[in-house]
Image (spheres, rainbow, N blue to C red):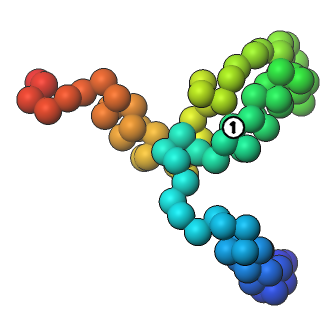
Amino acid sequence: ICDGWVVVKAGINAILEGYTRYIPNAGILELRKAICRKLEEGDSTLLECWSPVTYTPDHILVSNGAKQSSMQAVLAVVYQGMR
C-alpha cells in the first residue's frame, strides 16, 4: 500500500523540477532513451529467444493507452476528405 505522502512529495518534486507542462506526444525523452537501452541489452525474461535490437528515441512512442496509440496511428495516415 502506497503512503499518500510519497505521492505528495513526488508531486512537489515534479513541480520544483519544472515538470508542469504537457509532455511531447511521443513521450518523455528520458523514458524513450531508457527504453532504447533496455532493448539493446536484451531481456531473456521476456522471451526465450530475445535478441537485442538497436533503436533511437525517435523510433520509440510512449502513450497512455491503446486508444491514444490507435488514434495517433490513424491520424498519421488519414487526412481530411480521405475515404
Residue 3: name its quadrant: bottom right
Question: Which residue occupies the extreme bottom position in the image?
Answer: 5
Residue drawn where x is 67% and y is 74% of the image? 15
Q: Residue 17, can we see it?
A: yes
Q: Which residue is mark 1?
A: 32
Among the 4 quarters of the image, the one containing residue 47: top right
Q: Which image quarter holds the C terminus? A: top left
Residue 77 coordinates in the image, percent (x, y): 30, 24
State the image coordinates of residue 7 (x, y, percent, origin top left).
76, 78
Closer to the camera in the image, 75 or 50 = 75
**Image mark count:** 1
Q: Is residue 15 left or right of residue 26?
A: right
Residue in the picture at 72% in, 74% down: 16
Against 23, residue 46 (above or below) is above
Q: Is residue 38 above or below residue 13?
A: above
Q: Count neighbours of disc 1 (C-alpha within 10 A) and say few if under 14, some if 14 to 19, many if 20 or more.
A: many
Could you tell me the amino acid type at mark 1?
Arg
Viewer can see residue 66: no
- Where in the figure is residue 33, as x and y percent of width and height? 74, 35
Residue 1: percent from the left, percent from the top? 84, 78
Q: Give the quarter of the image for residue 38.
A: top right
Q: Secondary structure at mark 1?
A: helix
Residue at image location 34% in from the left, 29% down from the top:
76
Q: Nearer the viewer, residue 46 or 20?
A: 20
Q: Which residue does the image show at 83% across and 21% down from the upper left?
A: 40
**Foreground of the two, 50 or 31:** 31
- Residue 80 in the figure: left or right of residue 40: left
